Image (spheres, grey):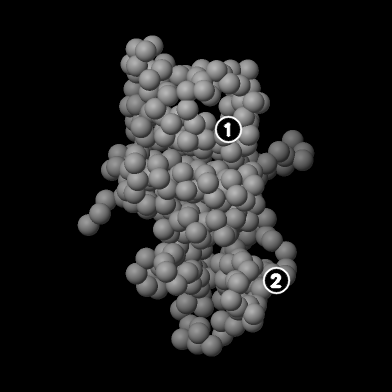
Amino acid sequence: MKEPIIEVKELTKQYKINRKHFWAKDTFVKAVNHISLQLYSGETFGLVGESGCGKSTTGQVILQLIKQTSGKIIYKGEDVSQFSAKRLKNWRREVQIVFQDPYSSLNPKKTIQWTLNEPLEIHNIGTKESRKALIIKTLEDVGLDANYLNRMPHELSGGQRQRVAIASAIILNPEFIVIDEGVSALDVSVQAQILNLLKELQKKYQLTYLFISHDLNVIQYFCDRIAVMYLGEIVEVVKTDEVGLMPQHPYAQALFSSIPHMNDDDQKKVVLKGDILSPNELQSGCAFQTRCPLAMEVCKQEKPELKSIAENHVVSCHLKEEESYENRCAI
Ligand code: SF4
């Protein structure tokens, strides 16, 4: 049985909300609510959902850029929270992140050489000469060259800046990279170039990606498996394959129905109605109950659990427990 490179167990991240009055009780909002995931070596695992659903928080907690409230991150069988300071520093070489906006993730006052040299110096890697050679090789791996060494970020296009951000992520030869909306700020033609580059680098460096995006087209094209998040929870994990995505959760179906299909004139776009619950409003039942066109009485009372419905396919919905699901699922 293949062992996961990253395992997330019952992960929760909650934030305290400012009290309106000093005598009021503390209240908390759950940005991530008891999620569990397994990511396997070499795969591209997508995390998709509306803005504010908790997907970026999940990525940052996995990398320990912010601490979880509860739950565990297991990296190659080791509990990350138990790492010593030395092990944690070494682990930072093995896991990296690429953010949406390369301009804000690069130091505007420093050259590209300085930016790429910094992680090598922090980890005490190589000599001055060998570091420079590695920087040039890494620039070439991302489609740039030595001519960029002395350039400043503002002299580069958006696509070139994102290539530098990717170079900065791979220069320490990591195994796992979180790509948080990594192509969302780019033009469509540049997006395609960067996605192709990421695919090439994945093979060359044997990388595992957690790819976070709100862009359904991109995530469907780029990922091997996709987890759909709603209000801090995973509602479905589904494999992408040749026949495309076959989501079963009503929210995931609505989300993916908005992608235009060139050959489908009868395509129905599902427009969700109803208010989105605030995560701290949810007392019981399914988080999607106020917007779900198929909600039943049980959905207000009992929280559905993530259950396997096929190989590589889990869904949390009471309808999956109903015999009449296929007939009722009109969307
Ligand atoms: Fe809709 Fe109920 Fe399924 Fe939630 S559990 S998605 S409310 S049918």
Q: Position of residue 80 (x, y in %)?
A: 37, 36
Give the residue pinned by disc 1: 161
Who is closer to the viewer here, 87 or 226?
A: 226
Q: Judge whether 271 appears above or below 15 on screen.
A: below
Which residue occupies the foreground of this view, 61 or 297?
61
Choose top left, top right, bottom left or bottom right for residue 152. top right
Q: Which residue is drawn at 47% across and 27% down?
A: 145
Q: Give above or below for 194 relative to 139.
A: below
Q: How many neighbours does mark 1 have within 10 angstroms: few (below 14), some (14-19), or many (20 or more)?
A: many
* Residue appearing at x 42%, y 69% in the figure: 242
Tell me if the residue at label 2 has its CB under 8 Å from ligand 1.
no
For badge 1, the amino acid type reads: Arg
Under tag 1, what secondary structure?
helix
Kindly check if marks 1 and 2 are in contact, taking CB atoms under 8 A apart as contact: no
Residue in the image at 74% along x and 35% along y: 22
- Determine crowd level at label 2: few under 14, some 14-19, many 20+ residues with C-alpha closer than 10 A: few
Q: Which residue lies furthest to the top in this view?
A: 128
Where's residue 175, x and y in %?
A: 35, 39
Q: Closest to the observer: 189 or 64?
A: 189
Residue 172, relative to residue 1: is it above or below?
above
Residue 125 x %, y %:
35, 18
Disc 1 vs disc 2: which is toward the camera? 1
